[in-house]
Amino acid sequence: MNDLKKNEPDQPFVTSYLLYLLAAVSDRASAEFHDHARAAGLRVPEWRVLACLADEDGAMVTRLARLSLMEQSRLTRIIDQMAVRGLVRRQSDPEDRRRVRVFLSDEGRDLALRLIVDARAHEARILDDLGGADAQRIKPMLETLLAQLDGRTPG
Amino acid sequence: MNDLKKNEPDQPFVTSYLLYLLAAVSDRASAEFHDHARAAGLRVPEWRVLACLADEDGAMVTRLARLSLMEQSRLTRIIDQMAVRGLVRRQSDPEDRRRVRVFLSDEGRDLALRLIVDARAHEARILDDLGGADAQRIKPMLETLLAQLDGRTPG
DNA sequence: GCAAATAATATGAAAATTCATATAAAACCG
DNA sequence: CGGTTTTATATGAATTTTCATATTATTTGC
């Protein structure tokens, strides 16, 4: 029926391109949880920062930016807002006064810990759906990949 | 030495959280290629759109938005700019005049095809570094995951 | 065939993000 | 030391993105 407009390659590129699959899976999977985070009153970047701080409370801004996968000046402004909301507080490091360390407030920590419980449950559901062998392997695989990618352009 | 400030959980959360690993790997891997795309004069969302159109030339805006993982009104504006630059052209669908189909220009197609060659090479390098068994498995695994995620909230 | 509901795209206005750079503190070096 | 370079964070201005909704076209149900 429609042969005239068929201009596509014999094998599709994008839907089987590794970087596309990673982005797509990340997007869709995260979107599910982000709805939950928003329901808890957090915007996505705020949830990410809280989750990172749950692991490394008191991290300096640069470290937190790298860990939370955002550009530094963006993180600075997100911290501004979170501080106003009382989720975190800034404290300049006495050992090196250029550094600003970011700490969870009690409220911030409570919220983070609560959401982390939910995040683990959500993750478990995804892995469960994925099924046995793959579910065992996917995280180690991604960890390897991440280490390799970081190794190339050390940072 | 530093026990006073140790407030972190025994097991870190974020760096072993599936959704974090996905986002981190996607970010870092894509960043490598995005440098290349920018060197070719494209911004990241433009590269994504070109890659999608290489597979589905003439896709309607809604479809293209979903495929390229962006919100519709954002895509509309990106297409505006790409059209001005002569990378794509819009054509309203005679069968349903609400629809706008987006087509690659010759220039757009050339650029897309050239970059896709590079993208495949980049992907091959990443998979090669990952090594045998995992390299074989990662894409099918992500495809399964994507299908499952799409299945939950059909769209 | 018409009114209401639905669908596809575009757009205004607000908000977030980026990029370059300012500011301030520490490290380095002759 | 004093000057220069580097590092850490913040900020102004431009751009991009989002959110809600307008606009236009089609479908549905009566």
Image (cartoon, coloured by chain):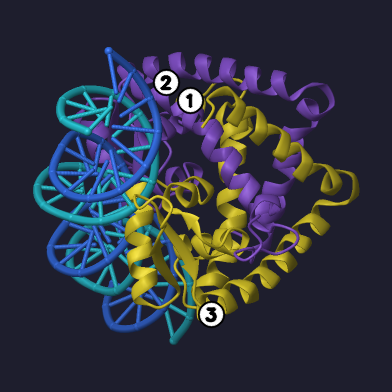
Chain colours: A yellow, B purple, C blue, D cyan
* Amino acid under disc 3: Asp
* Amino acid under disc 2: His
Element on which disc 1 rests: helix
Task: State the residue at coordinates (66%, 62%).
Answer: B3
Which chain's residue wears label 3? Answer: A
Q: Is residue A81 above or below residue A66?
A: below
Task: State the residue at coordinates (51%, 61%).
Answer: A58
Task: State the residue at coordinates (70%, 72%).
Answer: A117
Per the model, the C-alpha gap separating discs 2 and 3 is: 44 Å
| Residue at the spot of label 3 | A106
Element on which disc 2 rests: helix
* Amino acid under disc 1: Phe
Give whichever of A34, B9 is nearer the camera. Answer: B9
Measured as percent of width and height from the top left, residue B60 is found at: 40, 43
Tag 2: Cα neighbours inside 10 Å, few (<14), some, or many (≥20)? some
Which chain's residue wears label 2? Answer: B
Residue B97 makes an appearance in the image: no
Tag 3: Cα neighbours inside 10 Å, few (<14), some, or many (≥20)? few
| Residue at the spot of label 1 | B33
Measured as percent of width and height from the top left, residue C5 is found at: 41, 78
Label 2 in the same subunit as label 3:
no
Residue B118 makes an appearance in the image: yes
Element on which disc 3 rests: helix
Q: Which mark is residue B23?
A: none
Which chain's residue wears label 1? Answer: B
Give whichever of B142, A115 is nearer the camera. Answer: A115
Measured as percent of width and height from the top left, residue A96 is found at: 40, 50
